[in-house]
Amino acid sequence: MVGYVNAAQIRAARGLLGWTLDELAERCGIQGDLLAETESACCNGDASLLYAIANALEAGGVIFLDDCAFAEGGPGVRLRRRESCDEGLRPDQLTAENDL
């Protein structure tokens, strides 16, 4: 988990997973109104609150990108790959039978 998550990342992660505020609140064990305040950036939230929210979202399948993720464009969120990608055949594996 990244060291810090912000309100925009929480909203984005919840959106990627298709979870309502109530669903996320239940999954991380906090009150819905406190989660709504945290998501709206009205307050920074304490570290234990942000940790609980981030853990629930990560368990649901998101990955948080931190401020140092310059190659990816900075802080953000993306879905974790659920299954391996088909990388196809390497050139040395091509034959007349499998060359399309």
Image: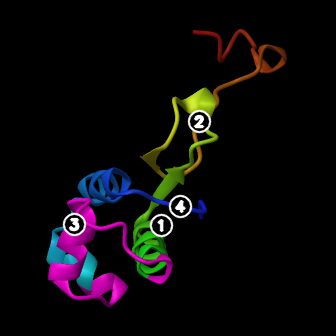
Q: How far apart are marks 4 and 1 (CA)?
A: 13 Å
Rendering colour mode: rainbow
Within 10 angstroms of label 2, few (less than 14), some, or many (20 or more) residues?
Answer: few
Farthest residue, direction front: 43
Badge 1 crowding class, 10 Å Cα cut-off, few under 14, some 14 to 19, many 20 or more, is some
Q: How far apart are marks 2 and 3 (CA)?
A: 29 Å
User: Residue beneath label 3, please?
Assistant: 19
- Expressed as whole percent of the image width and height from the top left, the position of residue 14 reads 28, 60
**Amino acid type indicated by mark 4:** Tyr
Checking the image for residue 86, the label placed there is 2
Whether residue 45 sits left or right of residue 94 in the image: it is left
Foreground mark, 4 or 1? 4
Q: Is residue 39 magenta?
A: yes
- How far apart, in angstroms, are the residues tagged by discs 1 and 2? 24 Å
The mark closer to the camera, 1 or 2, is: 1
Is any part of residue 6 visible from this angle?
yes
In this view, the residue in front, 48 or 58, is 48
Q: How crowded is mark 4: few (under 14 residues within 10 Å), some or many (20 or more)?
A: some
Tell me if label 3 and label 1 are in contact, CB under 8 Å: no
Residue 66: horizontal and vertical position, in percent? Answer: 56, 48
Residue 69 on the magenta span: no
Residue at the location (76% across, 21% down)?
90
Name the spot of residue 85 as percent of width and height, x first: 57, 39
Part of the protein shown in magenta = 26-48
- What's the residue at 51%, 29% (across, down)? 73
What residue do we see at 32% from left, 51% from top?
8
